[in-house]
Structure formats: C-alpha cells, structure tokens
C-alpha cells in the first residue's frame, strides 16, 4: 500500500516520504527500542541526501522506506522465521538499489545477489537445525531448552549456530565474510552505500545484541575484521573502497563489546555504534558534495583551495574515524578499549591498538592529499570544465549537524552514556 500510494503522488513523493517516515515512527515506537532510533537517523539522512531528479523523487524513496520497514520488522522479531522474512525484505530492495546506475552498479548488484542468496541459504539451514533440535522457532524457547539438562545431538546445535552466525556476519560485513563489501561499495551509487552501511548493520547488531548467540565464535570475526580493516585499505586508490575496509574495521570494534559481555562493554558498543553512524553519514555526505568524477583519491587534491570549510570538515571527520583526540571517534575507541582492559582481554587490546595505528596511515594520507598535494595537469583541466559547485542546503545541514556531534561529543558525552546505560540495564 505504501508503494502504491507513493507512486500515485509521483513528483511529490519526496515531500510525502517524510510523512510516511513519521508514520513508521508512530506505529513502530509503541515499544521504544534503541535500534529503531538509530535506523531512523540513518534512513532520514538518506532521504535528505536525495536530489531533485525524477527517479530520486519516485522510486528511490519507496525502496529506502521499504528497507527501513524491513529492518524495523527485524528489530521487533521474536522468532527465526520472522527474522528471515525481515532480512529478505530489506535485501531484495537492496538488489534493486545497488544495481541502479552504470554497468559497475549492475555488476555490484549481481555480486550482492549471488552472495546474498548464499548467506540466506546458510541462515535457513542453520535455523532448520536449531528449530528441529529445539522444537520451536522462538528465541527464548530455544535458549531455555538448550540451557536445560536435556541431551541433543552433538552436531546439529553447534553447526546450526555456526551457519546462522556466518550468515549474519555476511550482512554485517565482518571478516572473513567481507569479500562483497569493497566491490559493492565501489559499484553502488553513493546514496545507496550510505543506507547499506548504516541501516541493515544496525538491525543485525541489535539482533546479535538481544538473542544471545554463542559469543565465543565472535572472537574470530573480531580478530579478522581488525586485521583486514587495517591492512586492506593501505593500497586502495578509490575513496569508497577505502571506506569499505574502514567499515570492516569498525565492525571488529563493535563485535568486541559483545564478546566481553559485561555491562561496560555492551554500553561501549552502543556508544561506538552511534558514533559510527554519525561519522558514516558525515563522510559520505561530504564525498557527495565534492562531486568527484570517479571517486579516486587523487581527485581530492587541491580541493582545499576551492572549498576550504568543507575540506577542513572532511579532514576532521577522517581524524575522528582514525581515533585521534579530541574527536568523537577517539571517544568510541577509548570506551571499547577500556572495557576490554576491564574484561582482561589484553591480547585483543594490544592487537586493536596495533591495527588502529596502521589504519591511521591511510586516513592521514587522505588529509595529506586534500591539503598538501598539488594538482596534475589532467585534474586541473577536468575541474576547469566542470560547472561551479553549488552546495545543497539539505546536505550542508546534515554535514553541520553530524560535525557538531563529532566535534563536541567528546567534551560532553553524558547524554549518550545515560541513554546507553538504560538500554543495557534492560538486558540484565
């Protein structure tokens, strides 16, 4: 019904999409959940990034809102069957969103389709093993049954859990299930990448946060994600591939909080997730505002002379992603590392610090290209032929709002910590 009504409005859909968005807000917030707030932040940001083109006023808002609806259903799910249907609702919309555009987009959509079908098959097979052993599809029933003293098959239960975690790691872009991430980020439209980097990851993380899967299996994902996120982006020449590997590294920090399982580590993971969402929105909004041709890193050289304020904001955001104080990214990494020390995970602590130092190299490299690298003759001629860049008010508002949190959250983090502490206390 939402799609039919939206298509009826045609050119006015972008205005009415905000109304539909708040309808979702009203109907789904009868149970106030933290994940839905984060999903709304990401979905609302993507709607603000949409431009005046006809397809961005008709088709794209509908698909974006259906993705948000699917993740809302995922967050509210209480059994494995509804989880699968909710994941597939958002995944099918992403097939279309990723494939729209050039030939690279079609290739990226095909890769996401094939690997997404593989992960869905693994998820269904794992659910079949668990539900067959437990006799029910509900989370709490299976967990209660497995904590009892009844005997089950020694093979079905661990294999079922392993297959489900592998499928969820694919959706979270956690190594070693990250193969699709750089290619899809590079080929997909940038506005779709923003939605892909925030909304489904928030839903899957809330699922892992609440259902209590065996967290000992998460250690493999933590170590591999930190390592791949640090080393994978060192030789990249395109900004979206670099940000894809950066997102893989961030997922390692998020999962580490779940591995520790203490009150402080779960709270640190939620704080880190909020900061990751803000930084992702801001950095992709600035990349869209620069309007580079092929998203090559060398295309950012000399832009600090044309757009000094936007370039300074871009540099600050990358310093925050690298975890340099006094920005919000440093606060997120600090609380996660502190929770790891309190949980006596010293090996992962030193490994995470080592990987963060390596990852800081390519973040500082972008700032160096932006401010200190000279333009080549080809780049000068290309920029001269372009039209004068006019910044969109909605993008400027979104960048300014995210920059406010990135710059000042470190000095006054009390509201974020109070909110996340209330969320975590509901689990204990």
Image (spheres, helix red, strand yellow):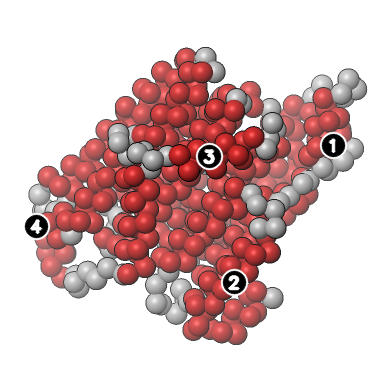
Kindly indicate the quadrant of the structure image that contains residue 113.
bottom right
How far is the residue under mark 4 from the one under mark 3?
Answer: 53 Å
| Of marks 4 and 2, the one in the foreground | 2
The residue labelled by disc 4 is: 377
Residue 20: assigned label: 2
Judged left or right of residue 166, residue 299 is left
Give residue 141's mark: 1
Give the quarter of the figure containing the N terminus: bottom right
Residue 238 is left or right of residue 427, and the answer is: left
Q: Nearer the viewer, residue 359 or 427?
A: 427
Q: Nearer the viewer, mark 3 or mark 2?
A: 3
Q: Which residue is mark 3?
A: 418
For this view, does 276 lie left or right of residue 258? Answer: left
- The label nearer to you, 1 versus 3, is 3
* Above or below 258: residue 106: below
Q: Position of residue 289 (x, y in %)?
A: 29, 62
Q: Earlier in the sequence, mark 4 or mark 3?
A: 4
């Amino acid at each position: 019904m939402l799609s039919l009504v939206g298509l009826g409005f045609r050119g006015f859909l972008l205005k009415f999409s905000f109304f539909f968005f708040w309808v979702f807000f009203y109907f789904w917030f009868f149970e106030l959940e933290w994940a839905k707030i984060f999903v709304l932040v990401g979905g609302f940001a993507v709607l603000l990034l949409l431009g005046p083109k006809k397809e961005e006023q008709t088709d794209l808002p509908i698909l974006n809102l259906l993705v948000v609806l699917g993740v809302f259903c995922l967050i509210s799910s209480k059994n494995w069957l509804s989880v699968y249907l909710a994941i597939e609702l958002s995944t099918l919309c992403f097939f279309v969103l990723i494939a729209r555009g050039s030939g690279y987009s079609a290739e990226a959509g095909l890769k996401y389709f094939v690997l997404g079908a593989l992960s869905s098959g693994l998820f269904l097979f794992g659910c079949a093993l668990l539900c067959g052993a437990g006799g029910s599809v509900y989370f709490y029933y299976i967990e209660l049954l497995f904590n009892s003293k009844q005997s089950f098959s020694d093979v079905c239960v661990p294999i079922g859990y392993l297959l489900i975690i592998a499928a969820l790691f694919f959706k979270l872009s956690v190594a070693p299930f990250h193969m699709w991430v750089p290619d899809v980020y590079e080929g997909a439209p940038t506005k779709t990448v923003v939605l892909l980097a925030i909304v489904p990851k928030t839903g899957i993380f809330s699922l892992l946060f609440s259902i209590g899967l065996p967290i000992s299996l998460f250690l493999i994902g933590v170590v591999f994600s930190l390592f791949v996120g640090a080393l994978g982006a060192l030789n990249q020449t395109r900004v979206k591939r670099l940000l894809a590997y950066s997102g893989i590294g961030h997922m390692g920090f998020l999962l580490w909080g779940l591995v520790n399982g203490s009150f402080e580590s779960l709270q640190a993971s939620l704080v880190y997730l909020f900061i990751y969402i803000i930084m992702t929105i801001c950095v992709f909004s600035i990349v869209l505002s620069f309007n580079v041709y092929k998203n090559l890193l060398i295309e950012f050289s000399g832009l600090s002379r044309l757009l000094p304020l936007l370039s300074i904001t871009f540099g600050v955001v990358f310093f925050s992603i690298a975890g340099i104080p006094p920005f919000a990214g440093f606060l997120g990494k600090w609380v996660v590392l502190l929770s790891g020390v309190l949980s006596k995970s010293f090996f992962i602590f030193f490994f995470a610090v080592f990987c963060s130092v390596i990852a800081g190299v390519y973040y500082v490299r972008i700032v160096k290209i932006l401010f200190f690298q000279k333009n080549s003759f080809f780049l000068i001629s290309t920029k001269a032929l372009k039209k004068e860049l006019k910044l969109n008010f909605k993008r400027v508002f979104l960048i300014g709002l995210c920059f406010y949190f990135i710059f000042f959250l470190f000095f006054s983090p009390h509201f974020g910590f109070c909110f996340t502490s209330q969320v975590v206390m509901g689990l204990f």
